[in-house]
Amino acid sequence: MKSGLKATLIICAHLVLSLLNVNAQPFAATSISVCVYEQQKPSSLILKPQTGRFRVFGGGRLLVELNPNELLFVTTAKGKVRIRTIAKALGTFPKVLVKNICDTATFSLKAIDTPLVPRCYSGNISFTAKDNSILSILDIDFERYISGVVESEIGGKQVQEMYKVQAIIARTYALSNLKKHEADGYQLCDGVHCQAFKGLPSVKNILEACEQTHDMVVVNRDNAMITAAFHANCGGQTVNSEDVWPKFKSYLRSTRCPYCSSSKSYAWRLSVPVEKWISYTSEKGVSSSEALPKFYQQKSRKAYLEVGKVAIPLHTIRKDLALRSTYFSYKQVGDSIIFTGKGYGHGVGVCQDGASAMARMNMSCNQIIAFYYKGCKIVNRQQATPETDSTNSPTFDGVPNQIIDSIATQTVYKKEDSTLHQKRLYPKRL
């Protein structure tokens, strides 16, 4: 009997462990595929091993081995990729793969037709041709990618606790968005559409911060990994998620932030010709320039510019007029509309300038993250579960979330069109 009971307990234990592994699987990534130079779309590249050696494959066969400081020239040619070294041409192929011989090997990559300096990477990289440019997909260790994001996002002059904050939210964001570019054949891009990633970091403290926070992510009250939104400067007050994006998130609440006012990104000013402003608002449904206020002020964050029966989302104005934030006021001065604003970015989630100031005041990464993400905590990523739309997206007056999201994606709202707007239903970013 005892042996039978013991066997049963062992089987149950294995079942529990297997279930735990299934739950952890969505966030068990050890490497990540990133499209580099995604925004620049170069047609010519130069790859140079920095440390270690690399093998170059084309057409399914080994073409050459590269030693440190040897050059590989990569260009497009009639919908394919042409490669050569200084010594000889290697051929033209649909796809070229450059693989490291050891995991510690690094290489630099220079986009010839851009002014950008070479970037240093580790891992393996493939090249294919797409629309007369080269699609470069890097397969890199996940934590090395995170360390590169940290430096690309906040630079190399922060205190250690700020590096830890950025590492945790960068890791959370990446793991929550691994399918963002699934249709494109990779997981994330290296631009601000995902997270800025300009290669491996040069600052030792960043590597230490990533090691100290290894596998740490932010979860909500239900242990679901959050949408870890962040921006440069909130202008003194962050924004509710639903004022910018279609999704209501209970942890992304507007918060007064007294920490970012000394930053250079805090205040801005822009002049727009009156004629352009009248034409723009007319396109958005304002019927008469006489109804358009010559003065508008935000003492605290608002979601809309309301003119008569028309409400224009401020995030739409920001995008269309290339404003630095939605936290602005304006007044007409002669033939110009003078915008004066505060903040830089969408304003949702962590204010990086504010978080940096808090870190310099010796606040911990736990305190900083709890300040910007309401009701959230830091856990090991294996303890986290995927966030679902229903986790933080309640229905309003019995209206299904799908309908709410459809309404929320419209550009301009007329008050008589729906009672949803009057109930502040314009429930999310990147």
Image (spheres, grey):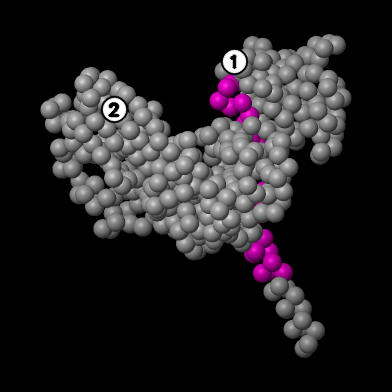
Residue at image x 66%, y 26%?
136
Please, is residue 388 above or below residue 4 in the view? above
Label 2 is placed on what type of residue? Ile
Q: Is residue 426 left or right of residue 417?
A: right
Q: Which residues are magenta?
A: 14-41
Q: Please tell me how crowded label 2 is: few (under 14), some (14-19), or many (20+) other residues with Cα within 10 Å.
A: some
**Residue lying farthest to the bottom in this orientation:** 1
Answer with mark 1 or mark 2, whichever residue precedes in sequence: 1
Residue at image x 74%, y 26%?
108
Name the residue nearer the viewer: 11 or 89: 89
Label 1 is placed on what type of residue? Asn
User: Is residue 4 shown to the viewer in this render?
Assistant: yes
Q: Which residue is mark 1?
A: 132
Percent position of residue 221, x then y:
49, 63
Which quadrant is home to the N terminus?
A: bottom right
Name the residue nearer the viewer: 358 or 171: 358
Q: Please tell me how crowded label 1 is: few (under 14), some (14-19), or many (20+) other residues with Cα within 10 Å.
A: some
Give the label, 1 or 2, closer to the camera: 2
Reply yes or no: does residue 21 show up in magenta.
yes
Q: Which residue is mark 2?
A: 338
How many numbered discs sit on the rendered protein?
A: 2
Q: Which type of secondary structure does the marked residue at label 2 adopt? A: strand
Percent position of residue 408, x then y:
32, 43
Rendered image quadrant of residue 36: top right
Percent position of residue 89, x then y:
80, 11
Q: Which type of secondary structure does the marked residue at label 1 adopt? A: loop
